[in-house]
Image (cartoon, helix red, strand yellow):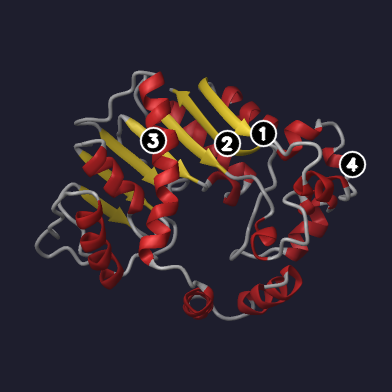
């Protein structure tokens, strides 16, 4: 969908009463989402491939550990990989929204069991169809409420959709409340999501707007803080976390994506960064408390 039409649609949804807007958002997502659950699970395999390499490199063993995931998404893909591939003792997944549906989880149980040669049995009485060892906490604000004690903290493409102050508050909170030595793993995609459905614009298209202009464009349904890689790193280190691993990809000169990026008239707020810093994407960072 053209990014301008999508923006208009989201802004119209945002005018509806709370919960009503979420209902129609789910309906619209379902209408436009053409990929199967199996297709969506395959997209998570790439995350796991990268994660496995980094865990091996840093000698991090997930077996019998407690994993705290924030940003559960639409179904428990990463919790299942943590439990059945990495043998975590338990996975506690938290989300500010409530997206899990029992029918979807039960379908995932069958697909995952067959595909990865394991047996997933829903825990008796679990209202989402989840197996023992995986707990889901929807409608939970980890900034305002307690965060669980864990050995590993994990997020997948979540930080860019939090307000900058909340990103800072969360990492300060983790520094104060989690035990020393806790591993924090973030996958970050700091690109303009409007481009995912409209490849005529740059992945960095939103960098042409002032903060005031951008606040008028996006809504809670497509919120993006626009933080660049150096800004994320500054937040982590200022909050007292150690960066033990960092990898990312930057748009290469001579590619179509780079040509689109160079057409963006950057706002003054972003002029101090290099092209590499501005286009850094597919970020994987590992921190230590």
Q: Which of marks 1 and 4 is nearer the N terminus?
A: 1
The 10 Å Cα crowd at callout 3, few under 14, some 14 to 19, many 20 or more, is many
Label drawn at residue 283: 2
Q: How far apart are marks 2 and 4 (CA)?
A: 24 Å
Q: Earlier in the sequence, mark 2 or mark 1?
A: 1
Label drawn at residue 268: 4
- Residue at image point 59% right, 66% down: 221
Q: Nearer the viewer, mark 1 or mark 3?
A: 1
Q: Earlier in the sequence, mark 1 or mark 3?
A: 3
> At numbered mark 2, what does the secondary structure look like: helix, strand or loop?
strand
Q: Which of marks 1 and 4 is in front?
A: 1
The residue singled out by tag 3 in the image is: 153
Q: In which quarter of the image is the C terminus?
A: top left
Residue 144 versus residue 180 in the image, above or below: below
Residue 48, position as x, y percentages in the image: 39, 40
Residue 58 versus residue 185 in the image, above or below: above
Q: Earlier in the sequence, mark 4 or mark 3?
A: 3
Q: Distance between the residues labelled 1 and 3?
A: 20 Å
- Residue at image point 51% right, 80% down: 24
Residue farthest left in this picture: 124
In the rendered structure, the answer to whether residue 168 lies left or right of residue 273 reads: left
């Amino acid at each position: 969908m053209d990014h301008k039409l999508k923006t208009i649609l989201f802004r119209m949804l945002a005018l509806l009463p709370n919960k009503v807007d979420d209902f129609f958002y789910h309906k619209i997502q379902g209408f436009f989402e053409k990929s199967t659950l199996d297709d969506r699970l395959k997209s998570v395999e790439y995350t796991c491939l990268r994660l496995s390499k980094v865990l091996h490199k840093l000698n991090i063993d997930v077996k019998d550990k407690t994993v705290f995931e924030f940003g559960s998404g639409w179904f428990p893909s990463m919790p299942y990989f943590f439990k059945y591939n990495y043998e975590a003792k338990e996975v506690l997944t938290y989300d500010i929204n409530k997206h899990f549906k029992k029918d979807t989880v039960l379908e995932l149980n069958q697909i995952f069991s067959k595909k990865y040669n394991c047996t997933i049995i829903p825990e008796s009485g679990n209202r989402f169809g989840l197996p023992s060892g995986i707990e889901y906490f929807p409608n939970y604000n980890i900034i305002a409420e307690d965060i669980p004690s864990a050995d590993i903290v994990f997020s997948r493409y979540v930080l860019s959709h939090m307000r900058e102050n909340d990103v800072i508050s969360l990492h300060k909170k983790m520094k104060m409340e989690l035990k020393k030595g806790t591993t924090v793993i973030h996958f970050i995609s700091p690109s303009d999501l409007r481009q995912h459905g409209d490849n005529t614009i740059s992945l960095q298209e939103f960098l042409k707007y002032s903060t005031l202009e951008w606040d008028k464009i996006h809504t809670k349904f497509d919120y993006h803080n626009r933080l660049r890689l150096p800004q994320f790193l500054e937040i982590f280190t200022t909050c007292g976390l150690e960066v033990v691993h960092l990898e990312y990809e930057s748009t290469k000169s001579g590619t179509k994506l780079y040509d689109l990026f160079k057409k963006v008239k950057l706002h003054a707020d972003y002029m101090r960064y290099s092209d590499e810093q501005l286009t850094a994407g597919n970020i994987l960072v590992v921190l230590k408390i």
